[in-house]
Each structure stands twice: as structure tokens, then as C-alpha cells.
Image (cartoon, helix red, strand yellow):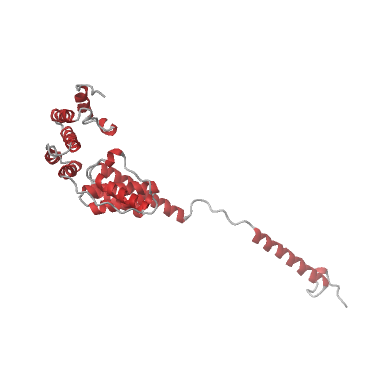
Amino acid sequence: MFGIHSPASASPFTGSGRLARLELGIVTCIVLALAGCAPPAVRTGPSPEDIARQQRLERAQGSFNDGLRQYDAGNYDDALKNYLLALDSGVLTVEQQVDARKHLAFIHCLSNREANCKEEFQKAFALDSKFELSAAEAGHPAWGPVYRVVRTELEFRRSGRSLPQPTPPTPGELAIKEGMTEYDGGDYNKAIRAFQNATKESYSVAERVKAHKYIAFSYCLSNRAALCRTEFEKIFTIQPDFDLEPAEAGHPSWGPSFRAVKAKQKPVKK
């Protein structure tokens, strides 16, 4: 008459039903807690931001290196564009930025854009207060005077002194600057004619020596070795203790001609 109920058919409202629900709840809480405490998945490989930065760095390095090669080849317009692209990337090192600014200054001065040349030197000094050209670079007649003006102005500002009035270039400096523009552009015949204007007796010894030196370089670069040696001989008659800069003396074009002429000179008494 009255059926016997098994434990499996216990009502959820009975004691055994409540126990089952409690056990289920505990298990669920444990699973959720473990899921929440699980360590986050480890990301493998660079992030999209890292990849984009690396690509930007590679493009900047490529532009920077292209600029240097084009400058050395005398292709100044393309060199200028690539240096600016590299600088605009914002990923160059300070040293590379200074080097780019320096070459931009050289290019502007060689193209008779003195104001732009000066501005690039100022930017180089802003990046590195100890920025300095090498001895051979500082003596270049095209950008050397501009560099010295910028450096002097910076020194005076730092010390709080008034700037001196600029000294106008001498006729010899102007003639040499004209020659250097043609020389750096690879037109050695025009360069020779311009430098010859700077060899007049009225100009200083230093100006005449520099002019003869670049005439010699121009002759050797255009495969006129005999005329190249003649110009070196003229230099020794003006300045017996003359010598080339170490970077110049090893040049494969005019180096052998210079050494041949120098070997014939009598030792200068000290």
C-alpha cells in the first residue's frame, strides 16, 4: 500500500537533497576560484607596437646609410632627402642625429645656403653641447667659417658676453670658397680656374697654399699627374715645411704624387 522511496528519488527538500546541493555549490566555487587564480596566458613574440618600431628603425637606418653614401658620391640633393627622412623617424640615436645634422650643414654650405647651414650646426650643438668637427672638416673653406661662427656665438652666449662683429671674408677666402663649390661638385676644370684666382701674391700664404693644394688634388683626380706634382712643388717653394693632413696623405689619387715631390725636398732645419 505504501511504497518505499529509494535515496535516489529523495526530494530536493529533504535533508539528503540539501546536502547534494551544498556539495555541488562547493565544487562550483572551487572550480571558479581555480579559474580566477590561473596565470594569464604568456604572450609569445614581439607585440605589434614592437614590430612597428623595429620596422621604423630599419627604414630610418636605411635612409641614414643611403644619405651617407649619396653624400660621399656628391649626390647632395638625394642625400639631403634621405637624411631628413631618417631624422623625421624619431628613432635615430643622438650620435646619428648629430652626424645627420652635420652633413646637412655641409650640403647647405656647399649649395651656398649659408643660413640653412648655420641652422643645422646650431641643431647639432643643441643635441650635443660638445659637438666638434675634425681638424680636416673644420678647415674646409665652405662650411668651416660658418661652423666657427656658430661655435663662437654659442661660447659667448654661455659666458654672457656680447658677440663680436663678424669679419668679412677676404678675397682669397671668397675665391677658395668658389673653387671648393666646383671641386665638391666634381667639376675639376672650373675648380682649378677658381683656385688659380686665389694664388695671387696679394693673398696670404695660407690662402695660396690651400689653393695650390686643391689645384693639385683636382689635377690628380682628373688623371693629370705631372701637373699635380707641379702644384705640390709650388707649395714647397711657398711653405717648405708643408705637409698634408694624415687623412689626405693616404689618398690613392694624389698621395703617391705628393710623396714623390716631398721626397725630393731638402730637410727643413728646425
- Number of labels in the image equals 0
**Quadrant (top left/top right/bottom left/bottom right) for the C terminus:** top left
Can residue 233 be spotted in the picture?
yes
Residue at horizontal 19 percent and vertical 47 percent from the top:
169
Q: Position of residue 89 (x, y in %)?
A: 36, 54
Seen from the viewer's position, the closer of residues 63 and 212 is 212
* Residue at 42 percent of width and 51 percent of height: 54
In the displayed structure image, the side of residue 26 where residue 148 appears, left or right: left
Q: In the current view of this chain or complex, which residue is farthest to the front?
A: 161
Judge whether 212 appears above or below 90 on screen.
Answer: above
Q: Nearer the viewer, residue 118 or 18?
A: 118
Residue in front for this viewpoint, 229 or 197: 197
How far across and down, in percent of the image, does residue 174 sit? Answer: 16, 45
Could you say which quadrant of the image residue 88 lies in?
Answer: bottom left
Q: Is residue 21 left or right of residue 141?
A: right
Report whether 228 appears left or right of 161.
left
